[in-house]
Image: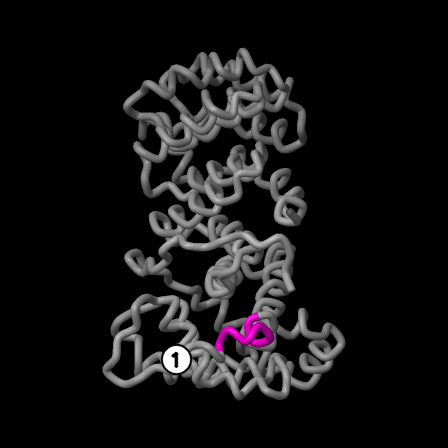
Amino acid sequence: MRVKQVFQTLLFCMGLAGIWAMPASSQATSSTTEEDRVPPQYATAQRFMSAGDYANAIIVLRQIVQQYPDNQLYQQDLATAYLMRKDYDRAEATIAPLIKSRETTARTYQIAAEIAESRQDDKKAIKLLEEGIKRFPQEGALYNQLGLLYFNQDKYKPALLSWIKGIQMAPNYPNNYYNAARTYYYTDDMVWTLLYGEIFVNMESFTLRTAEIKGILFDTYKRLFASGILSQVPLPEPNTPAKNFREAFLETLAKQAAVVNTGVTPETLTMLRIRFLLDWEQYFAHQFPFALFDYQREMIQAEVFEAYNQWLFGPAASAAAFREWMDLHTESLQKFLSYHQQHPIQLVSGQYYNDGHFAFQLHNP
């Protein structure tokens, strides 16, 4: 299956280095007093870690741990440094006591699972992550790491289900959207590739991963309209609720499918998506409130939606045409980019409509 091939770079980028760069909320220390007096040598340890000089980082971190034996952050960092050095025994000996602590954090479980996986004990790694999820059910990074672990074992469905659950429990954590969108690309369900992919692009907007997902989005729209699926979907009717969110999405899209009869381009997609939002507001917005559609409507009101669609689809459709469009619409593009920076998408918990039903297919059309 081609699914695993497209993930090889992800497994490198999202591995050990990602744990070292955990967000501050996951690196909480066990004492506010200690947090207020971070030792000056801690910055030295961080510089050694960033430079890949793990031996020197260990020397400094061991001194810090001796000074602050109750501070879990420094112990977590020391375990990570041992892990980077492939000194798995010391890494495990450092992290194991933290698992039992009432004040432990999700990051402890991540590091412990990485140690187990590095020792080729995937069963233990899965168990640790599942325990971590029970203690920290709203920590999106744990679902992401569990999904990657399953994926690395060629267990694609459990991997995708883990990322979907992560989206439900931690809607503002971007990596689960990224992994779910690119994995759904290899299933029979194109709806969630489109939705999760666009949400991710609005959360992480200017990276190589952004460019990758933009390409997947544009290709998925073309696949969807070329597949003939929408011709089999009933059109929405007033005061008639849909069975589920996915059905509502396809019905609303099918109502305006004729817009792309001349081909799927950034221009036709812009018109299609404007009409889609008008129909969604009329038929299903009350039944299925959805933050992405609210965000799109806000961009229409701010008069930046056309530029947004060019930014979203233009590079994948034609790099040359997009450059030409930028040359002719510099002010429109700058207006959108300014709006996008000042008004990030606001995701809402409870807007979870995925039933998790899908089947993998060996090749995309």
Using residue 280 as the reference point, say whether residue 117 is left or right of it: right
Name the residue rendered at 47%, 24% in the picture: 123
Name the residue rendered at 36%, 18% in the picture: 70
| Residue lying at the far right of the rendered structure | 320
Q: Is the stretch drawn in magenta largely helix, strand or loop?
A: helix
Residue 255 in percent (x, y) is at 43, 84
Q: Is residue 26 above or below residue 326?
A: above
Q: Is residue 143 above or below residue 259?
A: above
Q: Which residue is mark 1?
A: 234
Q: Please check the rendered image and state whether residue 226 is part of the magenta-colored stretch, yes or no.
A: yes
Mark 1, secondary structure of its residue: loop
Using residue 204 as the reference point, say whether residue 296 is left or right of it: left
| Residue lying at the far left of the rendered structure | 239
> Closer to the camera, 61 or 315?
315
Number of other residues with Cα within 10 Å of mark 1, as a class: few under 14, some 14 to 19, many 20 or more? some
Quadrant of the image occupied by residue 84: top right
Quadrant of the image occupied by residue 220: bottom right
Quadrant of the image occupied by residue 210: bottom right
Q: Where's the C terminus, which quadrant?
A: bottom right
Name the residue rendered at 36%, 25% in the picture: 34
Q: Is residue 334 visible?
A: no
Q: Please check the rendered image and state whether residue 204 is part of the magenta-colored stretch, yes or no.
A: no
Q: Is residue 125 above or below residue 219?
A: above
Residue 217 in percent (x, y) is at 57, 66
Q: Is residue 265 visible?
A: yes
The span shown in magenta is: 224-230
Residue 32 in percent (x, y) is at 31, 30
Using residue 225 as the reference point, say whether residue 173 is left or right of it: left
Residue 78 in percent (x, y) is at 52, 20
Q: Is residue 249 above or below residue 92?
A: below
Query: Given the image, on which type of amino acid does mark 1 rest?
Result: Pro
